[in-house]
Image (cartoon, rainbow, N blue to C red):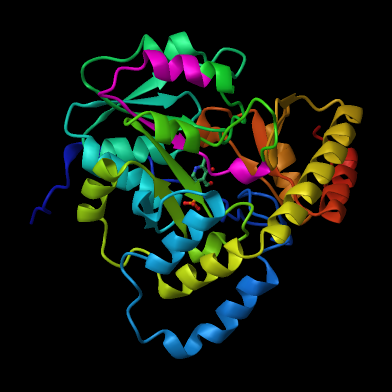
């Protein structure tokens, strides 16, 4: 008896490995493995979630009208240019489904977020890796790899697990020279954490270039990873095909209502991102004191290098501190550590001090 075969390219996909992996002997007490906001969402969001029980028998607004209005107001952009998704990964997949066919090429930064490759291969596309030098992307290296078959360039902005980003000047240069048949996708999942002068989330380029779009997430600074909510900002010509293929109810009414509440409490985002900045600076100092090398960091995590990475990972896990090994990103000597609460980072530093494998 033979089974029906899925599309051939799907077998080239390595399933996504998330931060929920708990090897034997691990204690999930302090989880610093998925770049979540350790302070969670705003109280306004929690209240909406508690009160939503009476409405779960009703279908949500398929087009998420209220939420798109609220996003539009918060960011000063037109709701007609927005599509919401089941997390921003849904948006990344929808773009591939709409724009990538068999044999088409998709540019993906080396060590780029895993979903780019999965979304590409799922459509029979060919992932084309953009090499990094010293963990940095370079505009020429990107443009050199564009061919008539290139359909999408997924730009992690800033990246995960490599936190590098192209500066405003570099992006201006890139977009002036990028052929218009390539859809440039700014994946700005960590944008709320960025206050660097040479960084911009991408909205201004979406408005200027018809081939530029931006994906955003409620999973990081907004503290709503479990509610699965993200959005796309794109010209209506691009919103159109995405809206045709989008599962009609890809965001729940609960997540839409929570998203509206979250957007209404920007003070919470400021509070959390400021705390993150403080905790990050302190942690980086402590790591430097311990002589543990790190890849340049910027948002809410660091990538730390260890000689005996697996042993350190296990030692931490057994002490109740779960971080993320990076073998799946071809960075087997690194552990990605999310910036948690100050006391959590302090505990991690103490455990690292006592770690015999460091
Ligand atoms: C760079 C990047 N993009 C997108 C996502 C997806 O986020 P979500 O689907 O939870 O919105 C993540 C999550 O880890 C990420 O790190």
Q: Which residues are magenta?
A: 171-193
Q: In the image, what residue occupies the spot 40% across and 59% down?
A: 86
Q: Residue furthest left?
A: 1
Residue 73 vs residue 320: left or right?
left
Q: Is residue 130 above or below residue 351?
A: above
The quadrant of the image that shows the C terminus is top right
Residue 13 vs residue 306: left or right?
left
Query: In this view of the protein, can residue 60 be seen by the observer?
Result: yes
The residue nearer to you, when weighing 54 against 332, is: 54
Give the x, y percent position of residue 109.
Answer: 46, 25
Q: Is residue 180 magenta?
A: yes
Q: What is the quadrant of residue 64 in the picture?
A: bottom left
Query: In this view of the protein, can residue 131 be seen by the observer?
Result: no
Q: In the image, what residue occupies the spot 44% across and 10% down?
A: 141
Q: Is residue 105 above or below residue 2?
A: above
Q: Is residue 274 magenta?
A: no
The residue nearer to you, when weighing 111 against 357, is: 111
The residue nearer to you, when weighing 299 against 237, is: 237
Give the x, y percent position of residue 78.
Answer: 41, 51
Count of numbered tags: 0
Q: In the image, what residue occupies the spot 47% across and 55% down?
A: 72
Q: Residue furthest bottom?
A: 54
Q: Is residue 188 above or below residue 209?
A: below
Q: In the image, what residue occupies the spot 49% across and 87% down?
A: 53
Q: What is the quadrant of residue 265 in the picture?
A: bottom right
The quadrant of the image that shows the N terminus is bottom left
Q: Is residue 53 above or below residue 7?
A: below
């Amino acid at each position: 008896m033979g089974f029906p075969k899925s599309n051939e390219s799907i077998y080239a996909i390595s399933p996504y490995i998330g931060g929920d992996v708990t090897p034997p002997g691990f204690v999930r007490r302090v989880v610093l493995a998925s770049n979540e906001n350790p302070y969670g969402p705003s109280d306004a969001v929690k209240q909406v979630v508690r009160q939503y029980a009476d409405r779960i028998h009703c279908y949500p607004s398929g087009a998420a009208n209220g939420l798109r209005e609220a996003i539009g107001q918060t960011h000063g952009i037109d709701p007609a240019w927005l599509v919401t998704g089941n997390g921003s990964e849904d948006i990344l997949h929808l773009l591939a489904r709409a724009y990538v066919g068999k044999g088409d090429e998709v540019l993906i930064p080396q060590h780029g977020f895993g979903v780019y490759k999965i979304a590409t291969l799922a459509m029979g596309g060919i992932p084309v890796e953009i090499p990094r030098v010293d963990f940095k992307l370079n505009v020429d290296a990107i443009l050199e790899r564009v061919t008539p078959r290139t359909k999408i360039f997924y730009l992690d902005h800033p990246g995960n697990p490599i936190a590098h980003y192209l500066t405003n000047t570099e992006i201006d240069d890139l977009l002036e020279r990028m052929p218009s048949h390539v859809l440039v996708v700014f994946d700005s999942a960590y944008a709320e954490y960025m206050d660097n002068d040479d960084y911009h989330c991408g909205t201004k380029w979406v408005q200027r270039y018809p081939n530029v779009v931006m994906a955003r997430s409620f999973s990081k600074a907004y503290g709503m990873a479990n509610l699965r909510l993200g959005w796309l900002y794109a010209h209506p010509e691009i919103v159109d095909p995405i809206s045709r293929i989008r599962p009609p109810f890809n965001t729940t009414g609960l997540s839409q209502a929570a998203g509206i509440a979250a957007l209404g409490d920007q003070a919470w985002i400021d509070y959390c991102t400021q705390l993150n900045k403080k905790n990050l600076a302190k942690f980086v100092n402590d790591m430097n004191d311990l002589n543990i090398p790190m890849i340049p960091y910027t948002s809410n995590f660091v990538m730390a290098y260890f000689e005996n990475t697996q042993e350190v990972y296990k030692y931490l896990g057994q002490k109740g501190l779960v971080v993320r090994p990076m073998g799946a990103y071809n960075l087997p000597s690194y552990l990605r550590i999310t910036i948690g609460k100050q006391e959590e980072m302090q505990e991690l530093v103490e455990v690292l001090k006592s770690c015999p494998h460091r």
